[in-house]
Amino acid sequence: HMYLSKNIIANGFNGRIHPVKIALSSTEGEAEFVSAFSPKYTYLKEATLGGSGHLSGARENTSSLKFKVKTETLDQFVAKNNIQTIDLIKLDTEETEHLIIGSGLNTLKKLQPILICEVFSKEMALALNDLLSPIGYKPYQSKKDHLQEVDAIAFKSGEIPDCFFVTDAKLHLIRPFIQ
């Protein structure tokens, strides 16, 4: 939160971007967040920037900084903040993306944001396809310099893990990148 706030100010977005100390999850409450210390940022003691933080239980704990965070579902967050439009949601929650999406289906059906998710397993690919296909989302695989429409997201080792899910209502936003 601290570094995001500094970045917002440094880039002139103060007042237009509002960081919130909430972790999206499948439930409302509190969870333990585990943040890995990165050898790249050894001088940081109050926070880490390693990019591999996750909620406890998401995967094996190899991290050394833990703290409690408030959690909400996507549907709860959108309702509490009276959010009327969302164009894009980028999820990188270290293999819990399907849980957040599963508890945010009302928001996804209503607002139809483009979703970008990292997919690092066959199980995650299947879960995302099963959740999103019934509500009108079509999958696109991220390639080196374009997006490719596919019948279903398939995990392939060595490929770029970012996958896009898009409804017809937002297709015009990505059309220039599709090959």
Image: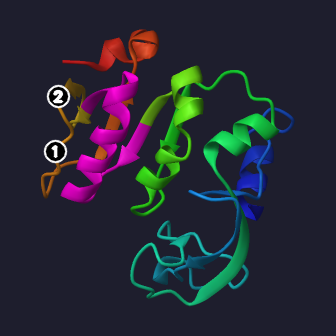
Residue 118 belongs to magenta span:
yes
Residue 179 picture quarter: top left
Disc assigned to residue 150:
2
Does the rendering let one see residue 17? no
Q: Amino acid at mark 2?
A: Val
Q: Which residue is mark 1?
A: 154
Q: Quadrant of the N terminus?
A: bottom right
Does the rendering let one see residue 55? yes
Q: Give neighbour class at mark 2: few <14, some 14-19, many 20+ (Cα, 10 Å).
A: few
In percent of width and height, residue 118 lies at 35, 50
Kindly identify the residue that appears in the image at 70 percent across and 80 percent down.
67
Q: Check contact, mark 1 vs mark 2: CB within 8 A.
A: yes
Residue 22 versus residue 115 in the image, above or below: below
Kindly identify the residue that appears in the image at 57 percent across and 79 percent down.
34
Q: Which residues are magenta?
A: 116-140
Kindly identify the residue that appears in the image at 76 percent across and 49 percent down.
19
In percent of width and height, residue 53 lies at 53, 71
Residue 157 picture quarter: bottom left
Q: Nearer the viewer, residue 137 or 66?
A: 137
Residue 27 belongs to magenta span:
no
In percent of width and height, residue 162 lies at 32, 44
Disc assigned to residue 129:
none
Total numbered circles: 2
Q: Nearer the viewer, residue 65 or 41?
A: 65
Q: Amino acid at mark 1?
A: Ala
Residue 26 versus residue 66 in the image, above or below: above
Secondary element type, mark 2: loop
Residue 154 versus residue 65 in the image, above or below: above
Q: Nearer the viewer, residue 65 or 168?
A: 168
Kindly identify the residue that appears in the image at 23 percent across and 48 percent down.
126
Left or right: where 44 falls relative to 125? right
